Image (spheres, rainbow, N blue to C red):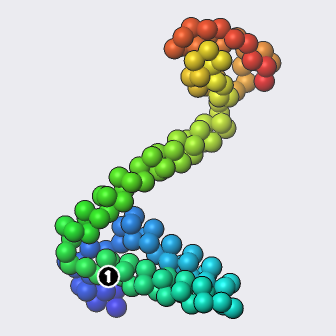
Amino acid sequence: MKDKLNRFMQGRYGVDNFARFTLGVALFVIVVGSFMRQNAAGGVLDAVGFILIIYTYFRILSRNISARYAENQKYLGYTQKIRSRFTREKNMMEQRKTHHIYTCPGCGQKIRIPRGKGQKVEIECPKCHEKFIKRR
């Protein structure tokens, strides 16, 4: 069965970030529509959700790889700032396990100090060379 699926998908575009996003939006719209069954908005939201699912599967099964690649690149370009901000915040949260992160009052530069360096720490900003004291 796995071989048949692999042969079927050969030469097709497959799943990318934009397909994941449209499928997630479609499922969200369908769930919201299921809570609005009493009025016409629920039916409209269901229809929009199913249209998005059909579009997503059209993209996944498409053989026009260059067009689907261009769509995905456009989506990635639009979402670059948001994705980089989440990545930066994720890295900051991982670093907080081993470092204290302080902000320089002079220039706003973020400075990492390893944990376990005492109760009071005098920090010199590497950017503006302002010295400040922080308590842990």
Q: Nearer the viewer, residue 8 or 87?
A: 87
Rendered location of residue 120, percent (x, y): 78, 15
In the rendered image, the vertical position of residue 31 relative to residue 84, given as above or below: below
- Where's residue 115, x and y in %? 69, 27
Residue type (three-letter) at the residue carrying disc 1: Phe
* Location of residue 41 in the rendering, given as x and y in whole percent from the top left corner: 60, 85
Residue that mark 1 sits on:
58
Query: Toward which corner of the image does residue 73 lie, by quadrant?
Result: bottom left
Is residue 76 left or right of 64 when viewed as pictured?
Answer: right
Helix, strand or loop for disc 1: helix
The correct choice, above or below, for 28 with respect to 91 in the image is below
The quarter in which the N terminus is drawn is bottom left
Vertical side of 127 occupied by 45: above or below:
below
Q: Residue at x 19, y 75 (%)?
A: 64
Residue 114 visible within the image? no
Residue at 58 percent across and 25 percent down: it is 110
